[in-house]
Amino acid sequence: MTLLGDLAEALIGGDHRRVEALTLEAIDASLPPRAILDDGLLAGMKVVGERFRVRDIFLPEVLMAARAMHAGMDPLAPLLAAEGVASVGKVVLGTVRGDLHDIGKNLVGIMLRGAGFEVVDLGFDVAPEALVRAAVEHGAPVIGMSALLTTTMPAMREVVDRLRDEKLDGTIRTVVGGAPLSAEYARSLGADAYAPDAYSAVDVVKRLAGVP
Amino acid sequence: MEPFLTRLRSGPTLVGDGATGTLLMERGLPPGRPPEEATLTHPEWVAEVARRYVEAGAEVAETNTFGASPLKLALAGIGEEVERVNRDAVRLAREGAGGKAYVVASCGPCGRLLEPYGDAPPAAVHAGFLVQVGILATAGVDAVFIETMTDLEEAKLAVRAAREAAPALPVAAMMTFEKTPRGFYTIMGDSVADAAAALEEAGADAVGSNCGNGIGEMVEIAREFRRHSALPVVIQPNAGLPRLCDGHLIYDESPESMADRARELVAIGVALIGGCCGTTPDHIRALRSRIQRHAPPPRRPSGP
């Protein structure tokens, strides 16, 4: 148990080499892959998210933790897949058209992968039709959209409208996030949900995708 | 006109211009397209924006080149137009200014995170600013504004590049802070004190802040810069913080209330007050009339 506590601490400290080593050690000790993920890596990311929210730490620390998360997920992912936990569902992600800011969106992608989602990340400056098309092609029940600029936020509405026009709004749900957004703005867009940060995005996407 | 830096140092407080992107969108710039593209597609809009600000009382016309570093233009898909986007923007700002305002180069972040947190090598970012400022300086500007920086490392690279590309031009460096429980920091964790010291060391002639805050927080930020730096301080607030109205975001700091509070900036000894997101020619007009009515106190000399 202290091994997973150490793993969480190493992740919080952004030490990707130590995270990789401790993950391998936990695997060698035959700890359940799901516990390594939940009580080690994700427990650490949760603390990172909370500290960032109150600006106890800043973006560099979050990015180093995200890199460490990757280092732990690399050896862990095949084991999670073998256990059948890896693919709980698919999500399409993108920063909306005109917006080149993808740091937050990338963090959401890391957290969703950690939670077992298959993430189709379309990158930044993504056209509304491309988000809808990708969700249809991949059979993804959720589209996650991000914007940092107040001028690009309206592009989110185009995705929502397009889903409704194509009568896809019953099968494909939308979640939005990004620094200038709020739950109120998400509602006014007609989006199905708002996620205030990368950690809570996982719970929101699970709820939208009907994943327990 | 006296040299830009002389005016910054000896006052009276200069009035900058306001937001560019929203005015271009009002004229028809498609949502999601970079404002710099208008320099190529609708040069008349770009000159008109500068003209409207100068008519409103702005003593500075910034070039429409905030996102025109080679790296950022490449992200926006018009990377091959670096030369034209920067050069023509200077001509258009000068045309709009009509000899009644300083023409100042605007340089924003390159749009990518520096190594080790992101994938942008510092040398490439530095080289990009070197190219951009080189073109702007050759086209003929009176000063360079490094703006909206959130990473002190990138801001330092930009200041150094500006110094190298245009040794004779004054450089003002502005960063964007957010209020945290422990004071003002950039998203990368840089404090006002750290920024003031590092930007001066990198060669900035003036330091300050733009974007991210309304004028209330900017008064606090300006005080901190004053406390930590003897350089002229430049401040360009947003028109308040964005608020929802019928599903649209609006900035609702009125020109009058912004101009009223700008007097506090003048009292602190701020050398230039302009506007960022949400500000309009009306904000600049109100600023100019208030600032002229309230003469600034004598500024601290910058030397020993």
Image (cartoon, coloured by chain):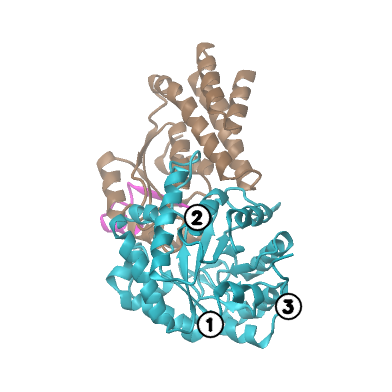
Chain colours: A brown, B cyan
User: Residue type at mark 2?
Assistant: Ala
For the residues bearing labels 3 and 1, Cβ distance under 8 angstroms: no
Query: Which residue corresponds to mark 3?
Result: B298
Per the model, the C-alpha gap separating discs 3 and 1 is: 20 Å
Neighbour tally class for label 3: few under 14, some 14-19, many 20 plus, Cα within 10 Å: few
Q: Amino acid at mark 1?
A: Met
For residue B1, which numbered disc appears in the image? Answer: 1
Distance Cα–Cα, label 1 vs label 2? 27 Å
Query: Residue furthest toward the top?
Result: A29
Q: Are marks 1 and 2 on the same chain?
A: yes
For disc 1, the neighbor class at 10 Å (few under 14, some 14 to 19, many from 20) is few
Question: Mark 3 and mark 2, same subunit?
Answer: yes
Q: Residue B161 placed where, x, y %?
A: 48, 55
Q: Earlier in the sequence, mark 3 or mark 1?
A: 1
Magenta segment boundaries in residue numbering: A160-178
Q: Residue at x 53, y 43 (%)?
A: A200
Q: Which residue is mark 2?
A: B158
Residue A1 seen by the camera:
no
Q: Earlier in the sequence, mark 3 or mark 2?
A: 2
* In-front residue for pair B92/A39: B92
C-alpha distance separating marks 3 and 2: 31 Å
